[in-house]
Amino acid sequence: MADPLLSVVQVVREYGDRVRTRALAGVDLVLDRGEFAALIGPSGSGKSTLLNIVGLLDRPTSGRVILDGTDTSGLDERALTALRARTIGFVFQFHHLLPAFTAVENVMLPAWADEGVPSRAMRDKALELLDAVGLSDRASYRTNALSGGQQQRVAIARALARGPQLVLADEPTGNLDTASSDEVFDLMRNFNRQFGTTFLVVTHDPRIADRCTRIVEMVDGRVRSDQIRSS
Amino acid sequence: MPFQWFVALRYLRDAKGQTALILSAVSVGVSVVVFLSALINGLQSSLIESTLGSQPHVTVRAPREAPRPLVEPTPERAVARLIQPASQRLRSIDQWATVMADAERVAGVTAASATVTGSGVATRADARLPIVIRGVDPDRFLAIIDLRSKMVQGGVDLSGGRVVIGSTLATDLGVGVGDKLRIASTEGVEDLVTIAGIFELGNDAVDKTWVMTSLRHAQSLFGLPGGATTIEFTVADVFAADVVAGEINARTGFTAESWMMLNAELLSGLSAQSSSKTMIQFFVVVTVALGIASVLIVSVVQKSREIGILRAVGTPPRRILAVFLIQGGVLGLVGSVVGSALGVAFAKLFETMTSNPDGLPRFPVQIDITLLASSTVLAISVGLIAAVLPALRAARLDPATAIRSG
Ligand SMILES: Nc1ncnc2c1ncn2[C@@H]1O[C@H](COP(=O)(O)OP(=O)(O)OP(=O)(O)O)[C@@H](O)[C@H]1O
Ligand SMILES: [Mg+2]
């Protein structure tokens, strides 16, 4: 079998200088390509912290993160940004779209920001993704003119815009009603099935966790249980 | 459009209120600078023009008679001296034709004219008025002071005992073109002359005293046959007049005075004006810079979550930096273009509103392209510099923290 997409080895993350909070107290986690994993656990257990570290937005106090065969501990900011742009897509709880931009511009952002100038291909790809999330008729809307579920679908399109290998989603359905949650979840699950994109999804919703191929449970900055299920 | 431009312009467009406010502030600042500069430059050049309209740029005079010692001190004998100034009789410049020819070869000299200038008295009926008799060669002198354009009556004709006099003097004496006038020099020589023309140079002292006659006539009035008491020059760059004067002095050995030495007070007034202009410009620049910087700082704070997201989706810090630098530069550019237009409009309006009934401006303004171009370049640079701190702050934001707390 090929090497895993992601290995998290003994990752510790502490905050504060005087009073030290241990958000992560030695986490080990290996994700294979194509997995659709749920990350669950009580509030404050370190889920978001772990996601930030895996997403290269934050560095561990100690321990290593190996992403797509690259040990990230030796990389500088520039290299981290480049690796992040190439391999990772983010979906945040509050969708975090840029309100100053239209839906299609938001989806184009990752490629545009990395390559500098926009291209026809970028736009076509963005429109294709908006179509795939069912929003082709909303492409030129400002994002604050969209509903919460629609915004989250734009965010998913943006996360997938560059064909990332790993999508990290922090409570993507946290603010949605049941119907919209299901829609958004199905969307991600379909991309996972269709393109083999690996997902790591933080959720508090047991119904959602239930439909994942794997459930990782965190408590107090540690992985308490890790359960692989048939998909 | 490159990413950083697109984001920068979109942010500016989106923050309509803020952008409009800071743009008006920058525009008003720039318009004040442009307006003031146009006004002050205009005032200064019309002051200089009217000053130089009635005087040469450089003048060489016959040396004054220095007191001569009657007894020289020797090592054995000290001498107690009582110095009395020598009587100043009008003298001719020795070999003035050669001196003039030498001086004309000095770089920057554009015209030269020899004169016999001395004091006298004009008499008409019971009026007796002090005058300055200026004997000149009209062809040469008109290149120094262009009387022709300043004639209010008659023409410049100095032949055969004809003279041209200042307008105030004509009024004071109650004479007009064609009238006769008796003039006497300080040497006691008298003559009856005919008035051929009356000029008005706009300089009171000149219009009140000058009687222009031919060089030959003045030579006979002052008993200086073939002589000349001054040589007058114009130079290409009026502000280089003292340099040219120094050069003429070095070349000929005669003391040469520039208009700048004779008008030191005017010049120090002008330079005080210029430095107050510089002060005002400086404070406007500082205010504009602070305004732009504070607007951008606020924008960085407001947008820190968005900046975090941009970073999370793979935007390199240098592009974030550029986004904010561009905003500063664009604010400076647009503000300076609008401000320059406003300033020019104000200046023109001011000129029209304060002009004389005959339509001639009383406060002529002077707008030059270099002024506008330099204020634009300045405003862009100020915008960029003001944006440096906010931009660095934006580029250094920690994305994880920014997204969490933003
Ligand atoms: N920037 C920070 N500075 C200080 N402490 C932090 C910071 N980020 C997280 N923490 C602490 O680390 C711990 C884990 O936080 P984290 O956000 O990862 O929890 P979580 O599992 O995502 O919780 P939730 O389900 O509520 O989102 C918490 O105790 C939190 O207070
Ligand atoms: Mg969290």
Image (tube, coloured by chain):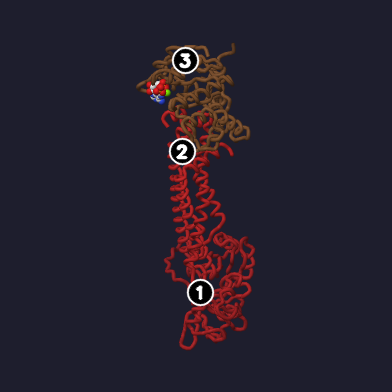
Q: For the residue marked with disc 2, what is the amino acid?
A: Pro
Q: Could you tell me which chain the residue with mark 3 belongs to? A: A
Q: Is mark 2 within 8 Å of ligand 1?
A: no
Which residue corresponds to the image point at 50% horizontal and 49% vertical from the top-left? B335
Q: Secondary structure at mark 1?
A: helix
User: The residue tagged with tag 2: helix, strand or loop?
Assistant: helix
Q: On the image, numbered disc 3 is attached to which residue?
A: A215
Q: Colour of chain A?
A: brown
- The circle on residue B390 is 2
Q: Secondary structure at mark 3?
A: strand
Which residue type does callout 1 highlight? Val
- Looking at the rendering, the quadrant in which ligand 1 lies is top left
Please give the label number shown on residue B206.
1
Chain corresponding to red in the figure: B
- Asked whether the residues under marks 2 and 3 belong to the same chain, the reply is no
Residue B96 image-quadrant placement: bottom right
